Amino acid sequence: MSPRTNDSPRGSGGQDAPRPAEAPEASTAPSAAADAPRSPSPAERVDALRRFAAAVRRGRGLHGASCAVLLAVAMTAGAVAVGGDGRDAARAAPGVSRAVGADVLVRGDLDTAIRSLQAHVRAQPRDFGAWAALGLAQVERARTDGDPSRYARAERALARSLALRPGNDQALAGQAALAAARHDFAAALDHADRALERNPYSERALCSRIDALVELGRYEEAGRAATVADRRRPGVPVFTRYAYVRELRGDVPAARRVLHRALDSAAGPADVAYVATALGNLERGQGRYGIALRHYARALAADDAYLPALEGRARAQAADGDRAGAITTLEQVVARSPLPGPLVALGELYEDRNAPGDRAKAREQYALVDAWTALARAGGVDVDLDTALAAADHGDTAEALRAARAEWNRRRTVHTADALAWALHRAGRSAEALPYARRATATGYRDAAFLHHRGMIEKATGHDRAARASLTAALELNPGFSPLGARAARAALKELEAAR
């Protein structure tokens, strides 16, 4: 990373001033501004997921696609009929204020930004830049509240922007972000490249290009893209991506240094919350739970409703032995944003506690994961990686293997290699799994769950010495990486030692 800070000189970005529209009047085009006056509250959304999951359990013959459509209707139609001020919504994602536009975002408040932009495009329907900003704001809001139905609204807003000004870089960058959010990373890369042809200094396009290359497993190219982005638009969004690329290559000290510099340069609460959370996640992954908890505390001091920080704190609490605190925190997270990661983590904590009723509570969390993935698919999101990881341990192993294979055929990353390895192992095909488990750890990326999976696969295939090394490394790196996984790793090591 170059030795620059947020106040370094940057390109102007080449933004065009709004000009008279070349497109039809707004009355002749679909309206993305008035699609949904308000999305459902977190409580309404979780309740809809629970009702959907219960319906699936009661009537297994109900067609999955029909269920997804009914769920999408349940989770969006109520938004029109029920009033509210959106105070329960999660705050903005990292660096969003600069990505969407400082003139419409106040302290990262995306709900306010969306309402302001909707009002603006009703009054000024030919403002292509406002339509692009609205589309990107909807993408970012979906990332924070777990409502994939927003992606269709984002798509319409971005299409409207491009109809008004064909090829404008703001909308192309928004399309890149939308494609990445839907996990269509090949399309995200294409849109980002097209945006950068128009505007080489587009921060959103530069960041989406890094994200796409990382998620396609093209790590060397991602590193070069991060260097280019740092040269053109140094700042928190680029710094954090640069750090992640370094972490994926096994250079944790460099990732840590970059994140600390990013935190020093963070200009507002949204950026402080994001970078401090990233540091917390990095340190938690290295087993440094006390340091991680201090970073999460700093993030929550900047934004006490920042859900990634709350989730990170809960995972660190669990790893550090505070299971009760972790459960309480994760219950708060999933009550507001029922995403697969925290749902599975909470389910496993219930299983680990094993108090009366905990088994049923755990099953409910896993059912909610299934419900969320159905809704996400209805919103055009590729959720095969989420499905593979959850189903391998807590669902249908055949479905886990199908999903993992599909994801591997689309993109070959360390994460998809690990997911395919584990799905194969859980399906009883450990010999086939071993090359993928080795590939997941080949870049130098150090993740205790990956090492645990590799060790269990090595044990199953008779590679006892390698299994001991992998399982020991997992527990030394991050002894609390998973309440159930760490327990299984310790038990497997005990068996291996007894067999020597």
Image (cartoon, grey):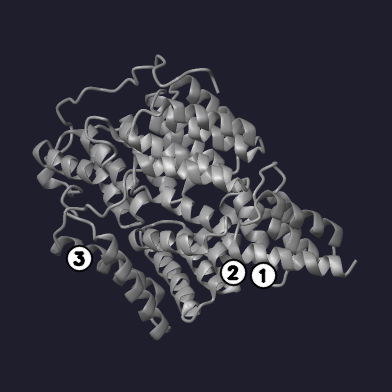
Q: Nearer the viewer, residue 399 or 456?
A: 456
The residue singled out by tag 1 in the image is 426
Residue 393 is tagged as 2
Q: Quadrant of the N terminus?
A: top right
**Camera-side mark, 2 or 1:** 2
**Local secondary structure at mark 1:** helix
- Pick whichever of labels 1 and 3 is earlier in the sequence: 3
Residue 269 in the figure: left or right of residue 434: left
Q: Residue at x 66, y 62 (%)?
A: 486
**Amino acid bearing label 3:** Gly
Q: In which quarter of the image is the C terminus?
A: bottom right
Residue 275 is situated, as x and y percent measured from the top left of the image, at: 45, 37
Estimate how packed mark 3 is, as few (under 14), some (14 to 19) or many (20 or more) residues with alpha carbons within 10 Å.
Answer: some
**Amino acid bearing label 2:** Asp
Q: Which residue is drawn at 18% across and 47% down?
A: 33
Q: Which residue is drawn at 26% across and 69% down?
A: 74
Q: Is residue 360 above or below residue 226?
A: below
Are dots 2 and 1 in contact, CB under 8 Å? yes
Residue 27 in the figure: left or right of residue 429: left
- Pick whichever of labels 2 and 1 is earlier in the sequence: 2
Residue 132 is situated, as x and y percent measured from the top left of the image, at: 27, 37
Residue 315 in the figure: left or right of residue 72: right
Q: Nearer the viewer, residue 413 or 40?
A: 40
Q: Which of 386 and 261 is in front in this view?
A: 261
The residue singled out by tag 3 in the image is 78
